[in-house]
């Protein structure tokens, strides 16, 4: 009696999870599984899936230059973007927490999240205008005599890195500022009273205590930039060796759906591995801080 | 023993338009334990932060051991600081926390280890060197904070309500420990607190702050027994602050009741008489002919003492006069104080009544 009542109560407490759970199941888990199954199908020469299972698609992903180059390029870009975001986000997050005036904090917050509040089309066209041959950057470069002819700024690694950093920086700032806001200001004063200069306090107190926030920000930025493709597509065109763009190409232009699925899953696996690795580091660090280690 | 002298002159500090601290002068002697006592908002924490260097005064000077440090950043002032919430570095072990101030001073590693052992022994935590702050109790954490601040032997230690997060029993124990420790190491300590009994128990001298200035500075006995203002008397829990008119050399009038108190002030002038609760005795028979009469209107037992309220009888014997509080030590079950409704005669030691100009 009591057991069943207890069980019923526990089940009832799960009811609020139902709508969200069904949504997730129907629109995320099920497609994910069917994509995975698709990635295991062999294909005929016209990329039509055949019955049966094979690792053919994954072998192609890891042996063909077309895929492998895209994966390496994308992972490198994601790492660089993550590193830049971490460095740029730190001072901004710090100001966001420690600015005296409320108005200043609101203003910073607004500037930080502005890329997320702008439509991807508008934002990308802004970049196109800024970076075009007749755009302000090229005219400045020419006016001060750094270059003779306009540079092609629109395609290329640097552009992708800049525009992706622009849109992902808010995620890094917000996660990091949450972490920084948990650092007791008394610790900073304690460090100072013990004779540590501001730089030393940053290195020995702020940075170690911000590591969990840095890591969760890095996880977010890294996984988002591994899969990003609309922004680079709109700014730099379809011919960049980005994995996201290649998935799009394979699925919707070449109609090689199993190949696209395999590349997607490889990307997914790389992100998951990175997340697991960083989370493990973060967990270890948190344990150390909270004194169970 | 000349190090550890702190001198503050003409200090003005505040946030924005508001002045929080307006201090003419304050000298803390080498090796002294000085409490800065006051209600919240009196400027005591601001004073500590100005001395520590975290708040820049808009005027005035802070001089430590002859060196004007007013414009010196906190990390070059070479003071020790102990915080209310301990402020231990959570990612460092106890030993690493204690070593922090030695490392910033580039003390050689070989000298660090014995020094760390020494201060951890001093606070009785030698066995906890490898633990992290999260694994320690509040009292232990506060001892680590103390050890950390003492490790590099600053001549002055500033303590910002360091015991107020501890429970009552531990707080009393730590008060004694801290005072004994201070006598042993001889460091000047400036101790901020809002707890008057803590300030009285621990200090060589107490500076009572009110509204940003020093209301009274003196030994615990001085400020307790001879409060110079009604604020001091009230803050130190005197209980009875009686606004009186002087009648003659030996009598004052409270409301329409005459009390036999010698004031040495001209007849007709106004004054406040401070009668401490514990100096009053309710007698069941007239002790002297002038003893004022009263009726007990409230009696409560609070463990080690009894709290009583009595209402003075007016000249026409009506129990409508001013109310006076009395505290009596508990003397056992056979000697309970007079019950509510009993008529009593009030008596006190003539020296116990302090007269303050109105």
Image: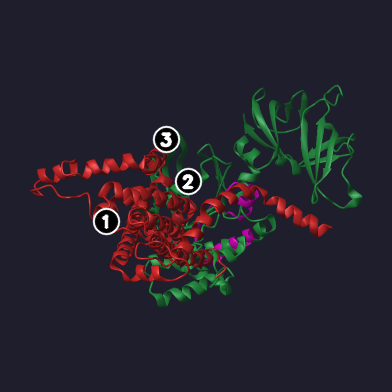
Chain colours: A red, B green
Q: Chain of mark 3?
A: B
User: Mark 3 highlights which residue?
Assistant: B16
Q: Residues within 10 Å of mark 2 (few under 14, many from 20)?
A: many
Residue A205 vs residue B261, the one in the foreground: A205
- Above or below for B301 versus A218: above
- Magenta segment includes A174: no
The quarter holding residue B275 reads: top right
- Magenta segment includes B179: yes
Look at the magenta stretch and give its main secondary structure.
helix
User: Mark 2 highlights which residue?
Assistant: B47
Residue B343 vs residue A242, the one in the foreground: A242
Q: Residues within 10 Å of mark 3 (few under 14, many from 20)?
A: few
User: Mark 1 highlights which residue?
Assistant: A240
Q: Which residues are magenta?
A: B174-203
- In x, y percent, where is residue B281? 81, 41
- Above or below for A280 versus B214: below
């Amino acid at each position: 009696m009591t057991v069943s009542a207890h069980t019923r109560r526990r089940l009832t407490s799960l009811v609020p999870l139902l709508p969200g759970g069904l949504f997730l199941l129907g629109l995320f888990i099920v497609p994910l599984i069917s994509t995975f199954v698709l990635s295991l199908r062999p294909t005929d020469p016209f990329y039509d899936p055949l019955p049966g299972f094979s690792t053919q698609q994954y072998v192609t992903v890891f042996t063909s230059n077309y895929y492998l180059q895209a994966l390496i390029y994308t992972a490198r870009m994601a790492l660089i973007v993550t590193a830049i975001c971490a460095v740029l986000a730190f001072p901004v997050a710090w100001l966001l927490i420690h600015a005296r005036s409320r108005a200043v904090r609101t203003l910073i917050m607004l500037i930080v999240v502005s890329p997320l509040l702008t439509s991807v089309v508008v934002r990308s066209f802004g970049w196109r205008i800024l970076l075009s041959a007749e755009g302000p950057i090229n005219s400045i470069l020419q006016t001060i005599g750094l270059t003779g002819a306009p540079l092609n700024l629109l395609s290329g690694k640097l552009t992708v890195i800049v525009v992706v950093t622009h849109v992902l920086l808010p995620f890094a700032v917000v996660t990091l500022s949450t972490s920084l806001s948990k650092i007791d200001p008394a610790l900073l004063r304690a460090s100072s009273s013990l004779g540590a200069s501001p730089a030393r306090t940053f290195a020995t107190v702020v940075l170690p205590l911000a590591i969990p926030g840095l890591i969760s920000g890095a996880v977010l930025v890294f996984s988002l930039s591994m899969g990003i493709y609309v922004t680079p597509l709109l700014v730099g065109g379809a011919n960049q060796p980005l994995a996201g763009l290649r998935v799009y190409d394979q699925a919707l232009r070449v109609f090689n759906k199993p190949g696209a699925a395999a590349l997607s899953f490889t990307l997914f696996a790389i992100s998951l591995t990175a997340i697991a690795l960083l989370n493990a580091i973060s967990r270890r660090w948190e344990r150390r801080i909270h004194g169970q280690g | 023993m000349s190090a550890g002298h702190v001198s503050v002159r003409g200090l003005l500090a505040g946030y924005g338009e508001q002045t929080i601290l307006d201090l003419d002068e304050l000298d803390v002697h080498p090796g002294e334990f000085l409490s800065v006592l006051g209600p919240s908002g009196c400027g005591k924490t601001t004073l500590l932060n100005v001395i520590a260097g975290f708040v820049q005064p808009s005027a005035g000077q802070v001089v430590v051991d002859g060196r004007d440090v007013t414009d010196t950043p906190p990390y070059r002032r070479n003071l020790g600081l102990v915080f209310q919430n301990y402020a231990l570095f959570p990612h460092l072990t106890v030993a690493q926390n204690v070593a922090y101030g030695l490392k910033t001073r580039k003390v050689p590693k070989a000298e660090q280890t014995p020094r760390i052992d020494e201060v951890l022994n001093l606070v009785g935590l030698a066995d906890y060197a490898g633990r992290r702050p999260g694994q320690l109790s509040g009292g232990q954490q506060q001892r680590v904070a103390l050890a950390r601040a003492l490790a590099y032997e600053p001549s002055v230690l500033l303590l910002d309500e360091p015991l107020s997060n501890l429970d009552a029993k531990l707080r009393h124990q730590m008060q004694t420990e801290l005072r004994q420790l201070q006598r042993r190491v001889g460091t000047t300590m400036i101790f901020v607190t809002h707890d008057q009994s803590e300030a009285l128990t621990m200090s060589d001298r107490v500076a009572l702050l009110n509204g940003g200035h020093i209301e009274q500075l003196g030994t615990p006995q001085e400020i307790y027994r001879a409060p110079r203002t009604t604020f001091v008397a009230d803050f130190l829990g005197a209980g009875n602050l009686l606004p009186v008119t002087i009648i003659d050399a030996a009598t004052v009038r409270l409301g329409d009741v005459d009390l036999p108190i010698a004031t040495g002030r001209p007849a007709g002038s106004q004054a406040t008489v401070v009668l401490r609760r514990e100096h009053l005795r309710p007698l069941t028979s007239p002790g002297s002919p002038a003893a004022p009469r009263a009726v007990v209107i409230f009696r409560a037992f609070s463990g080690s003492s009894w709290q009583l309220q009595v209402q003075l009888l007016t000249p026409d014997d009506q129990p409508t006069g001013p109310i006076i509080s009395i505290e009596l030590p508990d003397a056992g079950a056979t000697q309970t104080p007079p019950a509510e409704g009993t008529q009593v005669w009030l008596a006190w030691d003539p020296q116990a009544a302090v007269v303050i100009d109105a």
